[in-house]
Image (cartoon, coloured by chain):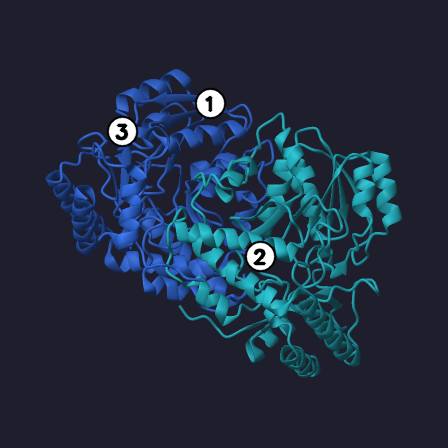
Chain colours: A cyan, B blue
Amino acid sequence: MTIPERILMGPGPSDVSSRVLRALAQPTIGHLDPAFLLLMDELRDRMRAVFQTENEMTLAVSGTGSAGMETLFVNLVEPGDKVLVAINGVFGGRMADVAKRCRAQVATVEVPWGRAFELKQLSAAIAQHEPKLVAIVHAETSTGVHQPLEGLADVVHRHGGLLLVDCVTSLAGMPVEIDAWKIDAAYSGTQKCLSCPPGLSPVTLSPRAVAKLDKRASPVQSWYLDLTMLRNYWGEQRAYHHTAPVNMLYALHEALAIVLEEGLPERFARHRAMHERLRDGLAELGIEYVSQPGRHLPMLNAVQIPDGVGDAIARRRLLDDYGLEIGGGLGAFKGVAWRIGLMGHAATARNVDLLLAALKRTLVA
Amino acid sequence: MTIPERILMGPGPSDVSSRVLRALAQPTIGHLDPAFLLLMDELRDRMRAVFQTENEMTLAVSGTGSAGMETLFVNLVEPGDKVLVAINGVFGGRMADVAKRCRAQVATVEVPWGRAFELKQLSAAIAQHEPKLVAIVHAETSTGVHQPLEGLADVVHRHGGLLLVDCVTSLAGMPVEIDAWKIDAAYSGTQKCLSCPPGLSPVTLSPRAVAKLDKRASPVQSWYLDLTMLRNYWGEQRAYHHTAPVNMLYALHEALAIVLEEGLPERFARHRAMHERLRDGLAELGIEYVSQPGRHLPMLNAVQIPDGVGDAIARRRLLDDYGLEIGGGLGAFKGVAWRIGLMGHAATARNVDLLLAALKRTLVA
């Protein structure tokens, strides 16, 4: 097996530090070993710290970010529930798809790709539909758009619903304040700003969301993702549910330690500084963002592919000549946009300057 | 993070070799990187070799064995379908639970825990129910029972159904002949006889099962486990679905290489020889099996806890004094049975003899 040397500046996975890789490769032990249970407790505390929450129900789902998304929908939606999904990119669309598969009555509110929602527009849709659940993406990985969330939960709660947020790309790269923003349910992924390999999804549920779970009339349609059972393994009972992905949990435990050692404010500032450095360099190359001004994500820079440049050819050249991975566009932005990630361990001046130099040569050639 | 030194002789996870741990810790690369796509193709070929199948639809689900179980049910069952589940332990019971959550009409056929089914009994139940799907466990991890499967598919097919088999514990430790036995759908887990960390589930579907999938009238209820989309990532289209658990797939790629280097017949013979060595040693200690004579699994030895021995205390002493993990009983066998695993890398004479010596001292003390 020959793994080439890469620098991962796409939409994820991001570069993983050697500390995390070493943790990943520690010998596997049992999922009920007392030493492992201690590690899980520390892991939960660290997840709570990064989510900025005191939520008791905070755990890592044994699957990637999309499994975390599905976990929250299958547990919080019952057949016939009205769900409002905000769509301005691929991942909002995916949430609507998942909600339909849970037999929810799905309504959507949409703005064009590359735009963020205004609170006014969301409030009007909530007042119109009175949904039991409102789902929105904090950092839309397909468009590079940051969706501000302050004030939204109050509106959702006033109409009797829960607020569910996709934090896959934002967590540990920009503020995600679960408790301060009164978010009821959120999921993330390990392979973005946490700089851990893909394979786990940290999730957190507020007491309000847990109350909804406790009052379900129907069983959760997924056995694997059923939080009414998973909480008995992650909680004090330690009841066996499925065999936990032990080594991946080692890696997440270490990745979270690195995040907390750096400090959340410092980490957010680094992501922002690297984003500005990249943005200024791209401007010099005449490359423009596809996302709305003022709403660019620091860790996911979605930019227009320059005129006359072959999308796949240019990305392949970056990969072959420099070992640099950037992402192509998804959905409506396929062939239109590139997605340049500055996530976690990869968000460094060295990487930004190398990419700018490589882009300059690649676009000229 | 301090990981204690263990020898894993429980029901899984099993010991992972340093080769596999090294593969796991290779730098993460992108899930659409050309080098990674090559690795996936090799991985599929290796999974087919170990499953002894030519099934095109053979892939690794991004979750543990239970996710593989759920994958097959959500894809192959439509609401209202009649499903017959054979239950003689925890994992048969789990399959019935999962099938109900897919809104199947579930019928069961049962024998007491510790017993295997006779073909005659299964045939009678199939003739009675005419199920669209028959689900059975090949190696029941909760009871240590081997279920012979020869001849069963013919009966299932004659009545118009598909045969789904749980091979979580058997794969790579005893013969699992998907094509020769005409099995339509099977799932396994990485953390048993493959000796890879937990986190992935190899699955395979026959053309007959794929035809059923293609004819579905309703969408698959799980987005994450939807094979109609997953096959477009594992197949030639390479369409993005979710971010693959890259490092875990490295590890499985290496673990399968080790299995195939040893050779399947040689590997099965080793498991059998170690089982016999353990069985003879346990007999000398007066420890008896809870599983039916002639149906003991080589890799999972379910034995009666000797009279007067404290279950948790004895297992804790093995762990603390020797770093040896064996498993407690599950469900009806909790407090009644121990489960001693001899899986993959851990199935060695050194481990068997150490465990026997440790048991002797622990039971006397």
Nearest to the observer: residue B211 or residue A225: A225
* Residue B4 in picture, x, y percent from top left: 36, 59
Q: Which residue is mark 3?
A: B114
Callout 1: SS: strand
Callout 2: SS: helix
Residues at badges 3 and 1 in contact (C-beta under 8 Å)?
Answer: no
Residue A46 is labelled as 2
Where, by quadrant of the figure, is residue B228 drawn?
A: top right
Nearer the camera: disc 1 or disc 2: 2
Residue at 27% x, 29% y: name it: B114
Residues at badges 1 and 2 in contact (C-beta under 8 Å)?
Answer: no
Residue at 33% x, 65% y: name it: B19
The answer for how far apart the CA atoms under marks 1 and 2 are is 42 Å
Q: Which residue is mark 1?
A: B106
Residues at badges 3 and 2 in contact (C-beta under 8 Å)?
Answer: no
- The type of residue carrying mark 1 is Val
Q: Are marks 3 and 1 in one subunit? A: yes
Q: Residue furthest left?
A: B284
Other-residue count near label 3 (Cα within 10 Å), few / some / many at <14 / 14–19 / ≥20: many
Residue B9 in sight here:
no
Other-residue count near label 1 (Cα within 10 Å), few / some / many at <14 / 14–19 / ≥20: many
The answer for how far apart the CA atoms under marks 3 and 2 are is 42 Å
* Residue B135 in picture, x, y percent from top left: 39, 30
Q: Is residue B200 left or right of residue B265?
A: right
Q: Chain of mark 3?
A: B
Q: Chain of mark 2?
A: A
